[in-house]
Image (tube, rainbow, N blue to C red):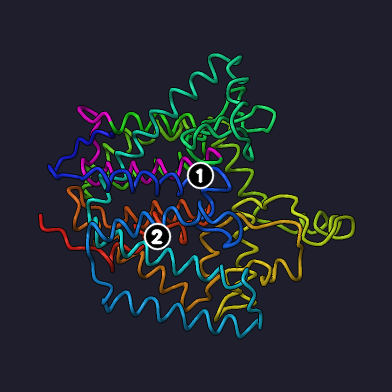
Amino acid sequence: MIIFNIRRKKEYNRYSIFYMFVMIIYMAQATPETSRMVASLSGNPIPFLIPIVLTFILCRKNPITFNNKKLFIVIILYLIWTICSLVKYGIYTTEELSYHFFMIYAIIIAYIHNKVFGYKIVPIYENIMVFLCKIAIWLWAISVLVPASSFIFRLFPETTYGNSILYLFTWMDPAKGQVYSGILRNAGCSWEPGRFAIMVTLAMFCNLCQNGVKFKKNKNIWWLIIALITTQSTTGFASALILYTIFLIKKFNLKYIFILVMVMVPIIYGLFQLDFMGDKITDRLTNAQDVSRLYEQFDYYNANEDEGTYLGSIDRFEAMTFEWMNLIHDPILGYGRNSKHSFFYTDITTNYVLANGLVKILSNYGFLLGLFFFFILIKSSINLAKDSYEKRTLGLFSVLCLSAISYQILSIPIFTTFWFYGIFRTPSKS
């Protein structure tokens, strides 16, 4: 059983820990089975039903009421938007309905988590992630230091970039490209390193909320930092830097500004010398300033590939530009949760998908519902700060927005739990 060392001495029953462990494994989406929580209704029903059954048992063990005005408002607003979106396109297939089902599903799971766990979700999530980071670090170290171990890793089920070892660790196959400077990247329990990195930075945020910037007698943060380093993730490193900057600023006076500059500037400079930081960010931002060069590529594949054939993802910054185009063409309702309705898919190319998840919240749901979701996140960031030992109003907002730049996270139940903390939480009694 995972051992917890938490500032506030609280008891956690074994089922709650087991339940949250399973939900985090599903959050990682390392395999098609664990992606069933947010993907299709069709296929093997068992992986889909596991989190539902476990959540039902959680509610039986921790009775809560669903007679909640805030939950009612959120669901009603989302259902109104859903009906308008369905009528707009006139498509009522199982696939179309499933997109909306999974968002409502995520909202209800978030409500249950916040009512059952309240602020305890913060230390529970952190400690389970530390446990998974320990596994990831040791197995990653073996794969790097003993290259011959690859034949063992290849015995396990194959994933997009490697092989999944019992859902706890995904080995990155060098032949599939997840290598920087000759060193394999660490994907932890997720399908790829960047996604694991944003799970780690959320755990770092949880640690900072409870301890502040503290390295002495804080073993958890060291495991999280080491795991993040092994991912070699641009998103992860940038998120961690911004998080620590936020938590280092205690007061706006010369003393703290001087300390911040003396500590952070050398660290930032050093990190930006890494290939996957400075050069990568500069190149991506430069490319994003002019996406016209991509149109020639799109035209070529539109003429030479079958419609809908997946060829790849557009980089997060370039994708942001195209998501703004999507939003301009559907500003009120957005194009919905099915990307096939987007301007990008219908008018530009069907062979690529857009990686950015931050602007996608607005382009999916339109300005009205999209801004409502961001309002909820701001409220959650404020309320989580109020309940924390170390209070930083912008903390949660920053870490989730930075994560959403590269990945769609709003409909992933654990992320949704934090996103909706501000309106569903059980107020802290401490």
Question: Does residue 374 show up?
Answer: yes
Q: Residue furthest right?
A: 304
| Of pointers 1 and 2, the one earlier in the residue sequence | 1
Residue that mark 2 sits on: 416
Which residues make up the magenta segment?
Answer: 192-219
Question: Does residue 248 show up?
Answer: no
Question: Where is residue 15 shown, x and y percent of the image?
Answer: 27, 46
Residue that mark 1 sits on: 195
Along the viewing direction, whichever of 127 and 315 lies nearer the viewer: 127
Q: Residue at x 30, y 58 (%)?
A: 113
Magenta stretch prevailing secondary structure:
helix
> Which amino acid type corresponds to the residue marked 1 in the rendered image?
Arg
Check disc 2 and report its element: helix, strand or loop: helix
Tags 1 and 2 touching, CB below 8 Å: no
**Quadrant placement of the C terminus:** bottom left
Residue 206 on the magenta span: yes
Q: Residues within 10 Å of mark 1 (few under 14, many from 20)?
A: many
